[in-house]
């Protein structure tokens, strides 16, 4: 029996809770400490833990690098996209008041989508950094 | 009570920072940088900055440590001894520190509610956020709504960093080049790449071959 | 809290100078980036210290209570941005260090200067 059983089983149990906690932090950022950045980093930490325990090849099959790069760009697109939608609806750039029937709901929708964009970009970035460093072959000097 | 925790954490931070300078094993230095990040996250909680503490703990002690360990795996753990005594850097640092301390003599006392920093937009955000935006966490409402442009810029900066890291590191290392007679030349590898070499050795080194000697 | 006066700021300046010294006096490139991180984090401590109000609490509205003193949220927002930008900078710096190592075979500044000049 290989000696990394504890790591494998422990990681297998913990990773779903780490990802769930990241989503909790994201959506409860309005009511307590939290928000897009923290949630993105914690979400990425779940995947990095998977890569550390099960190997980079397995992690790259679970989450292909191309998907990660797309995520990094998609978040910025969502953020700027919210700005352009508000422009289209008659307000200024990133004026969330026009997004719904009354300003308070508009602000809530705006903040929701914007934080989602931040989550996706930060998640994609952290995993992309990890793949870039961990996948590099060590040269002989 | 709060002052006690504040002073204790600050002194621990000083000790950790000094230990990082002296430490020549880079693995230990990176671990101590992680400790430094976590201590500063604790200090942020004492200063009522809970969002910042969360981010510092996740980013500083989490991602930063992972990236530095990844780099150490590629470049090596040990720092060489410094060759000459650092008199000039020490002088520069002491002078800069002296000037900064002279600058702080004009600062308002710590924790006073009448400080100039609390007079401009902060009361507006704290009073109007309840009606205009309606979410309890003022930091999120300022970050995402009142200062939404800055956050968009920050997201773009993170994306730009990803582009930069991918430009530098996405393709594997090229063929090995060494400096011969002042010119860079490419080494043509004739032996196997290092990883395969290593696997063979570890697989074949455990069982010595039985040799029948002809001592008869 | 007001009795602490300028102690917080002086300790922060000391930490900044420790980070600055590591950045300029040590030759190993990874150590320099660690020094840069120490410097950055101590600047964050300076900003957050300036935003604290004695007797205040975190700037999250408490339901149903009036007359609660909240600490200033604006420095918190600035530093949140700065932390994430700082890690992006460190990641870029470390990837440059990896490439330098592959080009020169070492990450010690004096050896690289001897080789490159």
Image (cartoon, grey):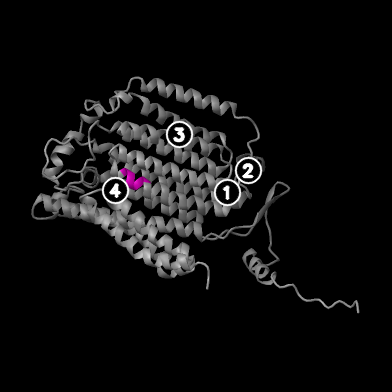
Secondary structure at numbered mark 4: helix
User: Residue B200: x and y, percent?
Assistant: 66, 70
Quadrant in which residue A27 is drawn: bottom left
Residue under label 3: B14
User: Residue B115: x and y, percent?
Assistant: 24, 26
Residue under label 4: B152
Residue farthest along the front direction in this orientation = B1
Instruction: Give the letter of the chain under mark 4.
Output: B
Residue at figure coordinates x 27%, y 39% from the top left: B48
Q: Do labels 2 and 1 share a chain?
A: yes
Residue under label 1: C100
**Pointer 2 and pointer 1: residues touching (CB < 8 Å)?**
yes
User: Residue B36: x and y, percent?
Assistant: 44, 41
Residue farthest along the left direction in this orientation = A101
Q: How far apart are marks 4 and 2 (CA)?
A: 38 Å
Point out the tag, 2 or 1, that comes first from the N-terminus.
1
Secondary structure at numbered mark 2: helix
Mark toward the viewer: 1 or 3 = 3
Q: Distance between the residues labelled 4 and 3?
A: 35 Å
Residue under label 2: C112
């Amino acid at each position: 029996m290989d000696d990394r059983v504890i790591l494998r089983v422990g990681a297998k149990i913990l990773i779903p809770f780490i990802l769930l906690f990241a989503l909790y932090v994201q959506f409860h950022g309005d009511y307590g400490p939290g928000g897009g950045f923290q949630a993105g980093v914690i979400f990425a930490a779940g995947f990095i833990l998977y890569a550390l325990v099960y190997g980079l090849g397995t992690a790259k099959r679970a989450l292909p690098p191309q998907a990660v790069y797309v995520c990094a760009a998609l978040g910025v697109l969502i953020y700027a996209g919210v700005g352009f939608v508000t422009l289209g609806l008659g307000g200024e750039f990133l004026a969330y008041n026009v997004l719904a029937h009354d300003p308070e709901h508009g602000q809530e929708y705006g903040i929701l989508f914007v934080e989602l964009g931040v989550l996706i970009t930060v998640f994609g970035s952290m995993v992309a950094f990890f793949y870039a460093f961990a996948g590099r072959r060590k040269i002989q000097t | 009570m709060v002052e006690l925790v504040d002073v204790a954490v600050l002194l621990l931070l000083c000790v950790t920072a000094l230990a990082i300078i002296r430490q020549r094993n880079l693995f230990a230095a990176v671990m101590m940088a992680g400790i430094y990040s976590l201590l500063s996250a604790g200090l942020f909680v004492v200063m009522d900055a809970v969002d910042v503490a969360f981010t510092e703990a996740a980013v500083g002690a989490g991602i930063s440590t992972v990236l530095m360990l990844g780099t150490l795996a590629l470049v090596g753990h040990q720092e060489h001894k410094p060759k000459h005594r650092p008199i000039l850097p020490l002088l520069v640092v002491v002078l800069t520190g002296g000037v900064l301390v002279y600058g702080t003599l004009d600062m308002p006392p710590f924790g006073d509610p009448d400080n100039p920093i609390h007079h401009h937009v902060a009361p507006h955000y704290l009073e109007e956020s309840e009606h205009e935006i309606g979410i309890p966490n003022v930091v999120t409402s300022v970050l995402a709504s009142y200062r939404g442009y800055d956050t968009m810029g920050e997201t773009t900066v993170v994306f730009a960093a990803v582009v930069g890291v991918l430009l530098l590191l996405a393709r594997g290392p090229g063929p090995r080049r060494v400096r011969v007679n002042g010119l860079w030349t490419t080494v043509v590898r004739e032996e196997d790449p290092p990883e395969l070499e290593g696997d063979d050795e570890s697989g074949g080194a455990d069982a010595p071959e039985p040799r029948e000697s002809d001592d008869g | 809290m007001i009795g602490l006066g300028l102690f917080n700021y002086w300790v922060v300046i000391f930490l900044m100078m420790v980070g600055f010294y590591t950045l300029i006096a040590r030759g190993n490139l990874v150590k320099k980036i660690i020094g840069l991180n120490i410097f950055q984090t101590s600047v964050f401590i300076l900003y957050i210290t300036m935003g604290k109000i004695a007797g205040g609490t975190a700037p999250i509205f408490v339901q149903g209570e009036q007359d609660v003193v909240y600490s200033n949220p604006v420095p918190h927002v600035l530093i949140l941005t700065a932390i994430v930008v700082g890690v992006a900078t460190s990641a870029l710096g470390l990837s440059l260090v990896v490439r330098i190592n592959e080009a020169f075979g070492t990450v010690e500044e004096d050896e690289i200067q001897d080789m490159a000049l």
